[in-house]
């Protein structure tokens, strides 16, 4: 009888110990986190936050929290490579597909340790990632409701603007604003007033000043569509590095042209940098 009791006690201890080990191995905790704002795109009025969690098992959890979402609707979300200004819809490479946001709660959680191509990514690498988050209206719609730069592309508070005056067409003018990114590059935003809806207007930095124009094209912006253009600024057209700090000293001026086939008509123009 004593032998049976001893065996039963040993089996009980073994089972208890194994259960405790299993529970410990399955317990995943967050050991660090960072939270960032994500902005509404256009007039969607949908915005919120994206939060990264570093997990104890070397995985990463991304939690998206949005306000302004509609009930009973799901919003596809992804992290794409490069900046939001470089994003080109289906032509842009997806780095991470996120769990769609539930419109009822405005939330989603995605846990992962690799990118879509199988490359391992760490929490620290995600904080410095060259990418942007894109959230669409639905699975069947390419309409963007929320988009923001992440990682090294996040915008700082360092920003300055130059006026763009009317030239060949009356009542069209604007501004160009440069905002520094965490990595030292810049976002250039051209905003026009009075330009026609639906127009596509090439824009460049030319060498020299307005007084000595015309000058050679040094940098090409994304075209101004209707009234807005957004371009990442990292290097000149010839490959020379050109970031936020370089804009202050560049010997140049900006031209916004009527169209690709009529570059001779200038809608707006202004000196920048050293000029």
Image: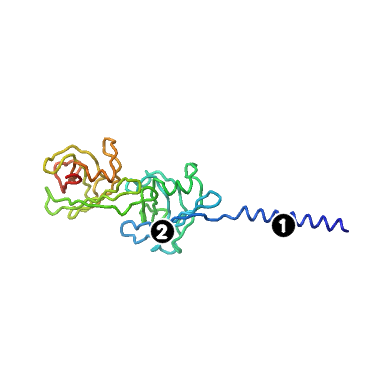
Residue at (69% x, 56% y) in the render: 19
Tally of numbered discs: 2
Above or below 107: residue 208: above
Residue 152 visible somewhere in the drawing: yes
Q: Position of residue 244 (x, y in %)?
A: 28, 46
Q: Quadrant of residue 92?
A: top left
Above or below 271: residue 137: below
SS of the residue under disc 1 = helix
Q: Alpha carbon of mark 1 to alpha carbon of mark 2: how far?
A: 43 Å
Is 22 displayed left or right of 98 in the figure?
A: right
Q: Position of residue 156 (x, y in %)?
A: 33, 52
Q: Nearer the viewer, residue 40 or 90?
A: 40
Judging by the rendered image, the residue that carries numbered circle 1 is: 16
Residue 159 numbered tag:
none
Residue at (35% x, 57% y) in the render: 39
Q: Position of residue 125 (x, y in %)?
A: 45, 46
Residue 88 visible somewhere in the drawing: no
Q: Nearer the viewer, residue 140 or 115?
A: 115
Q: Nearer the viewer, residue 224 or 248?
A: 248
Residue at (34% x, 60% y) in the render: 44
SS of the residue under disc 2 = strand
Q: In the rendered structure, which disc, 1 or 2, sits on the residue that comes first in sequence?
A: 1
- In the rendered image, the residue lying farthest to the top is 238
Q: Nearer the viewer, mark 1 or mark 2?
A: 1
Residue 49 numbered tag:
2
């Amino acid at each position: 009888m004593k032998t049976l009791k001893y065996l039963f006690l040993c089996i009980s201890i073994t089972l208890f110990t194994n259960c405790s080990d299993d529970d410990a191995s399955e317990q995943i905790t967050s050991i660090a986190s960072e939270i960032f704002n994500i902005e509404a795109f256009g007039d969607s009025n949908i915005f919120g936050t994206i939060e990264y969690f570093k997990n104890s098992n070397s995985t990463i959890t991304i939690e998206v929290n949005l306000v302004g979402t509609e009930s009973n609707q799901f919003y596809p979300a992804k992290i794409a490579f490069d900046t939001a200004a470089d994003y080109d819809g289906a032509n842009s490479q997806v780095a991470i597909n996120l769990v769609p946001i539930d419109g009822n709660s405005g939330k989603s959680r995605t846990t992962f340790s690799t990118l879509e191509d199988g490359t391992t990514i760490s929490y620290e690498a995600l904080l410095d990632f060259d990418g942007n988050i894109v959230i669409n209206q639905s699975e069947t719609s390419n309409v963007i409701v929320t988009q923001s730069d992440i990682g090294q592309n996040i915008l700082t508070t360092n920003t300055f603007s130059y006026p763009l005056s009317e030239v060949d067409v009356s009542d069209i003018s604007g501004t160009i604003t440069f905002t520094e990114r965490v990595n030292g590059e810049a976002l250039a935003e051209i905003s026009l007033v009075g330009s026609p809806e639906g127009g596509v207007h090439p824009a460049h930095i030319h060498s020299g000043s307005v007084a000595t124009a015309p000058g050679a094209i040094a940098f090409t912006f994304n075209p101004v569509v209707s009234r807005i253009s957004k371009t990442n600024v990292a290097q000149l057209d010839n490959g020379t590095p050109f970031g936020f700090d370089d804009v202050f000293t560049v010997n140049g001026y900006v031209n916004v042209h009527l169209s690709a086939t009529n570059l001779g008509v200038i809608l707006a123009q202004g000196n920048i940098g050293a000029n």
